[in-house]
Structures are given as structure tokens and as C-alpha cells.
Image: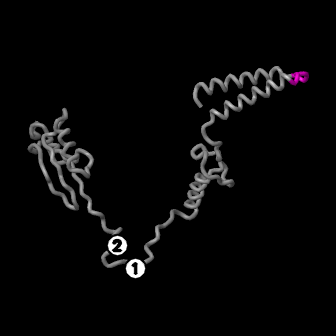
Amino acid sequence: MNHAQLTALGRALRLLGEHGEALTADTPDARLHEVKGDLRRALDLLEEGIGTAAPATRCAEHPNGPVDSAAPDLCLLCETRRRAARRAEINGPAASRPAENAPSRYGVRGDRPQPQQRWLPELWNGQEWQLCGTPRRDRREAELYLAAQRRGPRAAMAYRLVHEFTDYEVLRVWGTPVRVDIEPLNGSL
């Protein structure tokens, strides 16, 4: 309901309140017909302003969800979740059942991992190579990412792009990695 509709509805309801306060036992019929017309106008304004169907349940999460008349909030989705929780308390968590058919000598397709091809951007932190961004599926995107890192204000001394395809292969190295001692002055103080 927009602001103009809210304002008009508020005005109509205030007018009805004034009619209600003015009602007495000897109110003429003409005045009652005026109240009836104002009441219809308020209902019409309310009908225009409501954009959705009336809620079927008393659930705040699923107001128009499926109805379960046995549930306290009439929500089938929430009641199903509550029933599963009660069942888990009584029976314990559901155990996964092993496959019914005989195992294959070489396994099934779902048992073997799918080959993945990714490009891993890494930086030299002075001690070792570390991942400096999310692995990319596209090599060009990974190279653009590393180019942006090298131009950044806090660039590392070296970057490399590692190709991962079941195994790892270093594709390209930018800069020269130099091992840096963690302790200042080689630990002599």
C-alpha cells in the first residue's frame, strides 16, 4: 500500500470513527445510509491497497504456504520440520543406507572424482608460495587478476600462476622469490 492509499484509508477510518461516536438510538435513516456509503468507500480503499492474498497460515515465515490443520500455526512446512526434529530426538539421526547392489570391481562413476581444471594465483610471502585469490576456472581471468595484484599498492615481490588438473604444474612466474628471514638481523640481538 503506497502513501496516498494509506492517507486516504486513514481519513476514511477517522470519518467512520466520528460517525460511530455520533450514533444514538434516534439517528435518522439518512444518516445511517451516509455511514453505510462511507463504510463501503473505506472497504473499497482497503481492497485496492491489499496486494497479496490473505495469509493461509499463522506462520510469519510461510504465510501463504501449504496448510496443516493439526499444526498450531497451520503451517505444513514448519510442522514437517518440527516432526522431523521430534523423530530425530526419539530415533536418533537417520542412518545412511548402503547401496543395495553388489559393488563393482572398478567402482561406479559417482565414486571417482571428476577431473578439475583450475588456475591458482599464488604470491611469494618471503617464506613460501601462498594462494592469493580464489582459484579460477578461466586462465585469462586468473592472469588479469594477477596483473591487477602486481599493479596494486601492496604488491608482493613475486607471483605465479599454477595450473591444477589432477596434478599441479607451474605455468608462469612473475618476479623473483627470495627467502626472507623472519627474525630481523638473522636472529642476532
Q: Which residues are magenta?
A: 24-29
Q: Residues within 10 Å of mark 2 (few under 14, many from 20)?
A: few
Which label lies toward us, 1 or 2? 2
Q: Which mark is residue 157?
A: none
In the rendered image, residue 133, in percent from the top left (x then y), is placed at 25, 45
Q: To which quarter of the image does residue 103 belong?
A: bottom left
In the rendered view, how is the structure colored?
Answer: one colour
Quarter in which the C terminus is drawn: top left
Q: Label 1 sits on what residue type?
A: Ala
Q: Residues within 10 Å of mark 1 (few under 14, many from 20)?
A: few
Look at 12% across and 42% down and name the residue there.
Answer: 181
Q: Callout 2: helix, strand or loop? A: loop
Chief secondary structure of the magenta portion: loop
Tally of numbered tags: 2
Q: Which residue is mark 1?
A: 102
Closer to the camera, 143 or 95? 143
Closer to the camera, 71 or 85? 71
Q: Is residue 13 above or below residue 139?
A: above
Lateral position of residue 99 relative to residue 132, left or right:
right
Q: Which residue is mark 2?
A: 108
Lateral position of residue 57 relative to residue 181, left or right:
right
Look at 62% across and 50% down and name the residue there.
Answer: 75
In the rendered image, residue 26, in percent from the top left (x then y), is placed at 91, 22
Look at 10% across and 43% down and name the residue there.
Answer: 175
Q: To which quarter of the image does residue 87 belong?
A: bottom right
In the rendered image, residue 140, in percent from the top left (x then y), is placed at 20, 47
Q: Is residue 130 visible?
A: no
Q: Callout 1: helix, strand or loop? A: loop
Q: Label 2 sits on what residue type?
A: Val
Q: Is residue 11 part of the magenta span, yes or no?
A: no
Q: Is residue 63 above or below residue 26?
A: below
Lateral position of residue 125 relative to residue 31, left or right:
left
